[in-house]
Amino acid sequence: MSIASGVRDNKCAKCGTSFANSYINIQEHIEAKHYFQCKYCFKSFITVKEIESHDKTAHLKIKCPHCAEYCKSKKQLQRHIEAKHCIKCSFCDETFISIEDVTFHDRYTHLIVECQYCDSYFRSDKGLDQHIKVQHCFPCPGCSETFKSVEIRNFHDKNVHLTVECPHCDILFRKDEDLQQHIEDQHKFVCRWCKKPFKSSEEENFHQECIHVTFDCSYCTLYFSTDKQLKEHSEKHNLNKPKYRY
């Protein structure tokens, strides 16, 4: 109480704020401004930093071995680990403290069936078979064999099945029937001099007129590629002519 005025000077013990009225006003001020209560011992503090420091030094003495969390007791620590660090394997009853650990366990315990064509692993032969059918199954069009890549399949096809070669180009076929159809479609018109194939008679005739000048016999339907050949042939016609007397 002040001697001069006779009025009690009430101050907040936490921040020093003065209240001229009753003790109730101070309590209301503390509850509104400074009420950070410890959940373990119910002490109150002015700031969050103060209560965190109090918890760590007075109560939270057991540190989690897997993270920076502190716990009050071993029982509480166990509950924390089960909630935050207990990852169960999807294929057995084992538990792990991190995703990395459960992944490592899964790879070396359950993923034991290795694909012979790539670096993938599977838990069963059924899973591997399905993977191969989707990723590595390239069937040969000429037989029932399958291959792990298009390149290997094509190599097999060329050396085992594609043995019939077109005489006009470098295309290979599996059967004579396929070759015959190819010739009819692509090489129906062939130059009589150089055997070059053409798709139409117009192309063939144009080629012969430009590249192969012919010398036609005036006595028959034969033709020759040189004038010398024609003359030699024509002499045969002259020798066979009958001689007339006038």
Image: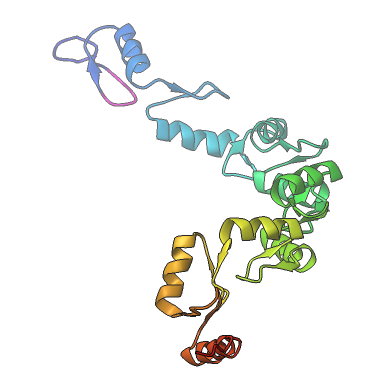
- Whole-percent x, y for residue 66 in the image: 64, 45
Q: Residue at x 54, y 23 (%)?
A: 39
Question: Which one is nearer the viewer's eye here, 61 or 200?
Answer: 200
| 26 is within the stretch colored magenta | no
| 15 is within the stretch colored magenta | yes
- Whole-percent x, y for residue 158 in the image: 72, 66
- Whole-percent x, y for residue 161 in the image: 78, 62
Q: Quick check: can you spot residue 42?
A: yes
- For the record, the magenta segment spans 11-16
Instruction: Identify the coloring.
Output: rainbow
Does residue 161 appear left or right of residue 69 in this picture? right
Q: Residue at x 40, y 76 (%)?
A: 210
Question: Which one is nearer the viewer's eye here, 5 or 39?
Answer: 39
Does residue 161 appear left or right of residue 208 in this picture? right
The image quarter containing residue 25 is top left
The quadrant the N terminus occupies is top left
Name the magenta segment's main secondary structure.
loop
